Image (tube, coloured by chain):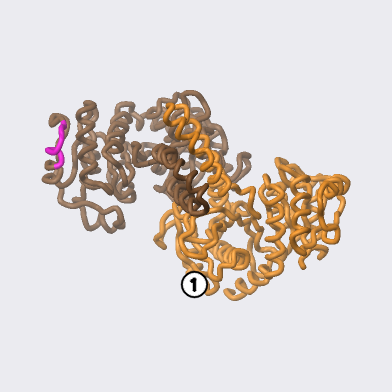
Chain colours: A orange, B brown
Amino acid sequence: MPRIAVDAMGGDFAPDEVVKGVAKVSLESGIEVVLVGDSARIQALLDEGPYDPELISVRHCASAIGMADDPHEALRGKRDASIAVAARMVADGEADALVTAGNTGAAVLCAARNFKLIRGVRRAALASVYPRETELPGQDVFGLLLDVGATIRCEAAELAQFAIMGSAYARRVSRQPSPRVGLLNMGREEGKGGDVLVEAHRMMRALPSIHFVGNVEGSDVATGRADVVVAEGLLGNVVLKLLEGIGEAASHLASQAAHDSWRVRLGMAMLAPGIEKVRDMTDFGTYGGAPILGFEHLCIKAHGRSSARAIANAVKVAAKAVRDRVADEIAEAVAGIR
Amino acid sequence: MPRIAVDAMGGDFAPDEVVKGVAKVSLESGIEVVLVGDSARIQALLDEGPYDPELISVRHCASAIGMADDPHEALRGKRDASIAVAARMVADGEADALVTAGNTGAAVLCAARNFKLIRGVRRAALASVYPRETELPGQDVFGLLLDVGATIRCEAAELAQFAIMGSAYARRVSRQPSPRVGLLNMGREEGKGGDVLVEAHRMMRALPSIHFVGNVEGSDVATGRADVVVAEGLLGNVVLKLLEGIGEAASHLASQAAHDSWRVRLGMAMLAPGIEKVRDMTDFGTYGGAPILGFEHLCIKAHGRSSARAIANAVKVAAKAVRDRVADEIAEAVAGIR
């Protein structure tokens, strides 16, 4: 069974929800977890509810990085921050993968500083799972979007590697034998998007290990047209945050409309349970997390607002990716095109 | 009163909805319109309902460009296509501005080939109006996003000019004395997004003629944080299409959820009128259109699915922009920074 290092101090509701989530996992699976952080607080939280002490150990460290801290500065000042200690444990072989709901920049930086890139991989990518429509029977209700912020601009060969990495992860984690991969672009035609995207399109079409469905547009992101959407970090980051913000905006918009008339107000009152349902479905906090792909070791970045359930899912996803040897699969696919 | 050339043959519901929209305008305002297209069909449609013959004239031309046609190829083959003839009329001074609901690429291309760039402007931009939340009293319910596809990648100085052009248009058309301008980026901090965006941020902050609120993220797009959102064409295009697609996806998602249980099904049935309301509010087809900014003459690109009401709004917006001398305002602001 894999052993997962969990940053107990990272996240808006840390350490409480993180520890609760890990306690939950210990009762549901055989996954071993090391909780990294303030041991007194962690132990007190563990003592509040049932957990399996055989599967949970605690590694004490004194400091933690805040959600709003500048990652570079914070890591310079706090070498013993929980995320940094947890990453070093994975690098040193004391654990197999890393899970954190903390500062995204710090997670990416700790991975970059402590983990080696998979042989042949040019750059790591942060991938995010997001809910979308499905089009085909058996299709996962979640899509994978990468990169969402580990890079800014990318070269064509880097985007092609993101396609390989995202496809390998989706194949293993969402159990789709042949995930459909799309290149995010301003038009479906292969000539769209300028030199880099035209070249990336050509390279992806030639990859034997992926099922490339061509360019996808902004309007395709929320559909089932592609299971893996590839973009440079700037573009992917804006798209991800737009998706996250849109649910919230829609319900605000609805409540503004409610001031219009009694009829609309009544309609909106009836609407409330439905809105809640849609909000639940699109609540990123309730799902696993975003893998940082391209390193020999996996880091799952859970959403900052993660509940205990989200943390538990993230730990399970990390363990599954380790068991299914996602990093090896990426290495083989990348080696195949060199 | 301004005289507007309207491409009668452009749009999913052309010429019917276009002609109806123009007939409506003629009864509501003093705006003169030249309908460009198949004169027999246009006249037959005009004869179906009331209109003011003093304000509407027809310019016959035999061909038209389809919504799915390749713009370059289509324009090569059809020099007398309605959009091309209408653009030449504006360039020749026979009309003051151009309105089309047809092929966007063809509209941009016809503007680029027939209109001169405003002195000092480096590149034109396609701007799109979209519904969003408001934060401040008196704020327009629509935001302006540019560029959404006239460019792919941009230099910092080009983005700074987009900020000037968008601000001038928003000031005149949405009557906000000081529209808030934001630069779309992957973080709010000024150091985010790489060299081009860092430099664009610096330039925008130094512009005396705009109210720059700094970087905005994907999650800010649907809020009232900025009235004018500036991005290179690739990024703006993906964001716009995502916004357009999201309403549709949300209602599909809701109907999928409806299969879950009778309780959810009941909730969704109650939800129907509310969903319709939100859909109406976010229906791009019911609003004016997207101005192509940077040329001496204005072109308003109405949505392909434009109804008569949307066409009427687009014609009124074009007339207002001409009366308010938006092009002169852009020229002055651009001259001020040279």
Quarter of the C terminus of chain A within the rendering: bottom right
Q: Quadrant of residue B197?
A: top right
Q: Viewer-proximal residue, A313 or B240?
A: A313
Provide the secondary structure element on which disc 1 rests.
loop
Q: Residues within 10 Å of mark 1 (few under 14, many from 20)?
A: few
Residue at the spot 72% in from the left edge and 63% down from the top edge = A319
Q: Is residue B200 visible?
A: no
Residue A133 in percent (x, y) is at 49, 55
Residue located 20% across and 28% down the image: B27
Q: Position of residue B122 (x, y in %)?
A: 41, 42
Q: Chain of mark 1?
A: A
Say which residue appears at 20% left-offset and 40% top-offset.
B19
- Residue A206, given in percent of the width and then of the height, sits at 49, 72
Q: Residue A50 in the image: x percent, y percent?
A: 81, 52
Left or right side of A298 for A32: right
Q: Is residue A307 magenta?
A: no
What are the residue bounds of the magenta stretch? Answer: B45-51
Residue drawn at 63 percent across, 56 percent down: A126
Q: Which residue is mark 1?
A: A206
